[in-house]
Image (cartoon, rainbow, N blue to C red):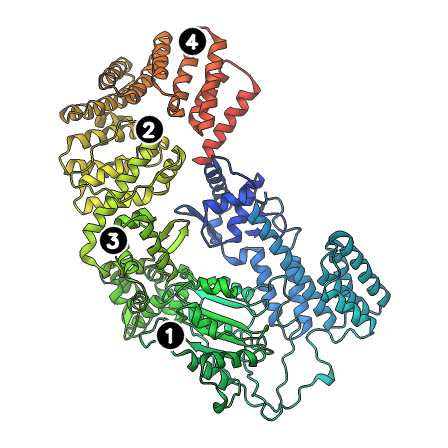
Amino acid sequence: MEFRLLGTVSVETLTGPLPLGPAKRRSLLAALLLSANTPVSIGRLTECLWDDEPPSQARGVIQGHVSRLRALLAGADAEAYGVELATLGDAYVLRVPETLLDSQRFEELLMLAREQRGPADAVLMLKEALSLWQGPALSGAFAGPPLRVASHSLEESRLATVEQLSRAYGALGEHHRAAALLTAETAAHPLRESLAAELMLALFRAGRQSEALDRFHRTRRLLADELGIDPGHELADAYALILRGAPGPFPGTAPPEAAPSPPAAGTPVRVTGDGPGADGPEADATAPPRPPLPAVPPSHTGEPHPVDLLPRAPRGFHGRAAELAALSRSAAGEAPVCLVTGPAGVGKTALALQWAHRNPALFPDGRLFADLRGFSAAGEPAPIDVLREFLLALGVSPRRVPESVPAAAALFRSLTARRGLLVVLDNARDSATVRTLLPGGADCVTLVTSRHRLEGLIASDAARPVPLDTLETDDGTALLAGVLGEERVLAEPVAARRLSELCGGLPLALRVTAARLAGRPHWTLAALAGELADERGRLAYLDVDDTGVAAALRLTVQQLPPGAVHQLARLGHHPGGHYDPYAAAALAGTDPVTARAALERLAAAHLVTETAPGRWVLHDLVRLYARSLDPASAREALIGVLDHCIATALAAADMVEPGGEPCFVLPEDYRRPSAVQDFADRAEAMRWLATEREDLALAALAAREAGLDDRAWRIILLQWPQMVWRARDNWSPLLELALESARAGKDAYAESRVLALLGWVLTEEGRTTEAVALLERSPALAREAGDPLGEATALINLAIVQAELGALPTGLENCARAVTLARREGDRHTEMLALQHLARMHLTARRPEEALACARAGLDLGPEHEEAARRSLLLAVCGEARLALGDEEDGVRLLDRAAQEAERAGYDEGAVRALAALLRVSARTEFRRRHDEALRRLAEDS
């Protein structure tokens, strides 16, 4: 299996390409592949699939494409290749080994090309990389703005590689090949001055001076005519060199007269030594890779032994290929500042050092390193001490090191102005400290690591962030094997994977775990996994000597203001996995504005992660640590978030059915949150219920376990809009939990309501025998609780299942009783629902006049803004009744109107029902097309 972006977006298999279908599905695949192994939010996918305002059903369209793509991958046995399209909250992630993605192999080949010492080997690697291109990047996809940017970036990378290959040909003396290669690309990109300049020099070196000069004049005229500009310095310099008849040495070589001379007396000693390699993909297309291929290491014969402040390379380093490649991309350009950020223990220093040790030729003037100890109990070093160490390494006499920070920083910038240095600043706490230590040379790279995002450094110095997340399970297992030995890990592969998961992919936790096992060869991996599975002692097991997860987190938390610490402590008691500012406020007893500020502060310290705008998560080990900060507040925090769930779900249900009958009264000790989320429309309310489904279920389970049964069944019952809309979506287990809670509290009202909804869901699932047994008990319980509207709802649901089981007269009787009860209570919504089902039963009983009367009465009850799905069903009954009475014209008109209302509301099931009835009496092509489209949408959503 192979995924292709460098050409037409496709998935190649042994039996040929997968039939991906429409352009938007290819766009979805491209967006997921461009962020392979990283969650992509629904919002980001929407931007990729639509150029302008997305349709109201954009989420449904995306879900349909994801469903179809998932089916295609499953049919191609993607799991065997390690490929998985997973849902993560409000986002999707395509997990795929990098070796299966052509763009990743392209970057890997570029990395290998840079590591070759000879130009002949570099040519082989670069040609292989360019052979992966089968046409313009992302062809066949609908290019929304983010995809257009990505396509342009990929094309820029390809062109930069073409220029690299031409220079490598030149180093071999194969100038005709370089000219042929560049001629074709220049024809396709006539305004790209770097290509034209390279072509001019290649032509001249091939003995074709007149063609080289002609190329300059043609390009100059084109720039003037098309853009109204003169040639840039690159093109003008190439022209001047050719006119002088000496275009200079090929990049990467030095003429004899340029041999280095001994340093003059008093000149600072040159810092040399091993430098990190550009291990990842090519540099930004706007700046040539450093150094240009082929790289020729400088000679330092007679110079002092090189000075190198880098610590040793990390041992047992595994994975991180994408991050290493991202660092190489970030290190391209002029005086770049690369910023590796991530939570405590995620391996930021190890990544920085691994990258720094990769290639000894990239930084010919040396490597400097300083641990800024921004999160250390020992405190931070003074900036003057760091600068003094750097200046001494650069050859400055101790007596010449300035005493003030500004003077020392200025001297450091001056000495690095013409050097190619790597400066690693580890464990930085703030941007101001880093700015003082930045070198002055355009060829210097600064690599900063921090637990904070250092957004100030991004704003002031264009720092390029490289966020570091936890390790995948396979890489975590490999890390364990690196310490324990492969034999021990291979002997218990399942337990090794379980340990990696329990450590949450955190390298620090994995190393502590490996250290415990290494010192106890008689322990099994399974035994330790069993110990770690108990959350109460997990953090204690992940501490050894002076190293551990809790200790690392403690140092981070010490840097936080009290409000952020309070918020973190309360987050540890949340029963779910995701937080928004409203939930966080309810946990902490604050307001959403305060909670959001605290969450932003925690995110800046990498203690929480923002997975989507306004939606955060905690790493499992951070959650356990947070819980330990204030264990006494657990029940108070839980009640706060449970009542937040109830309040928000009530607001969502009220938006779904404005003015509808509330499901229940609130608990006696209910604590209303300081603010409740507003919903702009029905779609937003339904989206919230769908997004929060898992967390609402976890909240209900936590309430049940804590003995808060009055909250548990309410949280579950309030999800009725989603249950009605997606009845066959496995709601039974959750409703059975609600039933347990209602019975535990001996609450007849709650039991009746839950039985009515559970019975209806079981009916929709085809489990009618179980449904009728539950529903027969519900009306009596409602009467016992004094809940006439609950009794009416129970009677409606009981009547539906009775009619399905053949007891139509009994069903008609119960539905009529429900109409009477609802009318007596003055509840139009429940009356309308009862009339809808009564009308359908009359139609089944071949009483079209009674059916028509009931349906019309139901429509008369509903206001203009009544739910479109219910109106569609009533209109469909009217249309079918008209057909049964022989009025075909009016029947067709009403059924068409019912289908249109269902289509506008995205209620495909109702559209299919109305259009199927139309097709029984009409052969119009339009009805068939709409029917098939609605069926297809239903299939994609399932």
In the image, residue 575 lies at what x, y percent? 27, 49
Say what secondary structure mark 2 lies in.
loop
Q: Which residue type carries mark 1?
A: Arg
Q: Which residue type carries mark 2?
A: Pro
Confirm whether residue 205 shows in the render.
no
Quarter of the figure with residue 197: bottom right
In the image, residue 822 lies at what x, y percent? 25, 19
Confirm whether residue 599 shows in the render.
yes
User: Tag 4 or tag 2, which sits nearer the N-term?
Assistant: 2
User: Tag 3 or tag 2, which sits nearer the N-term?
Assistant: 3
Closest to the observer, 109 or 836: 836
As measured in the structure, the alpha-carbon distance from the residue carrying label 2 to the one carrying label 3 is 33 Å
Q: Residue 373: which numbered mark, if any? A: 1
Mark 4, Cα crowd under 10 Å, few <14 / some 14-19 / many 20+, is: some
As measured in the structure, the alpha-carbon distance from the residue carrying label 1 to the one carrying label 3 is 31 Å
Q: Residue 884: which numbered mark, if any? A: 4
| Relative to 87, 186 lies left or right | right
As measured in the structure, the alpha-carbon distance from the residue carrying label 1 to the one carrying label 2 is 57 Å
- Position above or below: 473 against 700: below
